[in-house]
Image (cartoon, grey):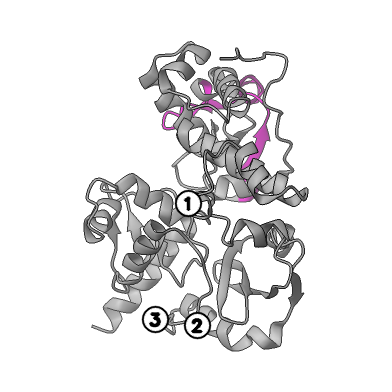
Amino acid sequence: MKTPNPKNPTPKIEATDEKKWQAILNRDARMDGLFFTGVLTTKIYCRPSCPAKTPLRKNVKFFDSPIEAERAGLRACKRCHPKEANGQAKEIQNVCAYIESHLDDTLTLEELSRVAHLSPYHLQRTFKRTMGISPKQYANACRVEKLKSQLKSGDKVTEATFNAGYKSMSRVYEKTKLGMTPTIYRRGGDGMTIRYTVVGSSLGKVLVEATEVGFCFISLGESESFLLSALRGDYYAAQIARDDDHLKKWVSVVIKYLDGEHPSLNLPLDIRGTTFQRRVWNALQKIPYGKVKTYGEIAKAIGMPKAARAVGHACGSNPVSLVIPCHRAVRSSGSLTGYRWGVDRKKKLLKLEKALDESTT
């Protein structure tokens, strides 16, 4: 087994102020330690993933380190403990680098804990708090990215699969969650036609992508430029074109829903997911308008009562927000954390649904 190479650390992620603000809206734990959020009105600085109420953009200033924030007269948040996250960022980066260089191996938590010089329990807890996912999930994500990169480079599917650390071809499509077969992905979606439109709403900009069959992706954001920056993504060879007129009828239903005028979103979909993900998504669509269920309750509903955490990940991978109402899934405590498009949007959606539900009963 190779030892970690301190000369090859995980590269630092550069982010514009717009991307930093979007990370705050999304509670993106992957950005923890890379910058810190200072709230000038409260004189407190936090991690990007802090669960506290999202501040107004005009009151936010970004800092590169806790020292810089404290020199500006701010104090550390008692909810997200930004100093602690920063103090262990180096150890977590070392673990990430080690995982990335050992994708062919089955790594244990004990082995990774020796790399980080932390106990297995402390490593698991700190890694997930910092990165937003477990070390095992990070390894899986790295394999997916390596597979995608090699497929894009033109490597044969079988060769790319084994080079990415997969032991066999079986179930690769399910494990990688490419949204298409590896062969089609290798061609970058060649032959596919995807139309899109961007419209304004009460929750900001809404980007809708659709094939001839139905919606394949819905995203929310503060600006059109941010949404369009990731539009093509994996479908680099597909035909992608803006088509406001073609999508007008479908999109109008989404806007009416956001305006509280139309509680039903029975729209055609063209999405792909694992068997487990589809079970979770189907369960989400069965949650009544104006109601919520905990991840544990959803896990029980699909016959897997111990899979609450996996249910949460399936909610996070939902490609068509709103139509599949992942915002109706909450923690057992009732807290509204973990929404891909920002907790504030989740709160507004639930408030909107509850108000309309009460007015019609």
Q: Amino acid at mark 2?
A: Lys
The reply to whether dot 3 and dot 1 touch (C-beta < 8 Å) is no
**Residue 51: in sight, yes or no?**
yes
Q: Amino acid at mark 3?
A: Pro
Please give the range of residues in magenta. 57-83
* Foreground of the two, 62 or 100: 100
| Residue denoted by label 1 | 171
* Foreground of the two, 331 or 182: 182
Q: Amino acid at mark 1?
A: Arg
| Residue denoted by label 3 | 263
Q: Is residue 15 magenta?
A: no
Residue 12 quadrant = top right
Mark 3 vs mark 1: in front: 1
In the structure shown, which secondary structural element does the residue marked by tag 1 occupy? loop
| Figure quadrant of the N terminus | top right
| Figure quadrant of the C terminus | bottom left
Gap in angstroms between the C-alphas marked 2 and 1:
40 Å
Picture layout, residue 319 above or below residue 46: below
Q: For the point 43% across and 84% down, which residue is it? A: 262
Picture layout, residue 212 above or below residue 107: below
| Residue denoted by label 2 | 256
Structural crowding at the residue carrying mark 3, measured as other residues with C-alpha within 10 Å and reported as few (<14), some (14–19) or many (≥20):
some
In the structure shown, which secondary structural element does the residue marked by tag 2 occupy? helix
Among numbered discs 3 and 2, the one appearing first in the sequence: 2
Gap in angstroms between the C-alphas marked 3 and 1:
37 Å
- Please state the horizontal and vertical placement of residue 321, each as a whole percent of the image: 49, 66
Picture layout, residue 206 above or below residue 162: below
Q: Is residue 67 magenta?
A: yes
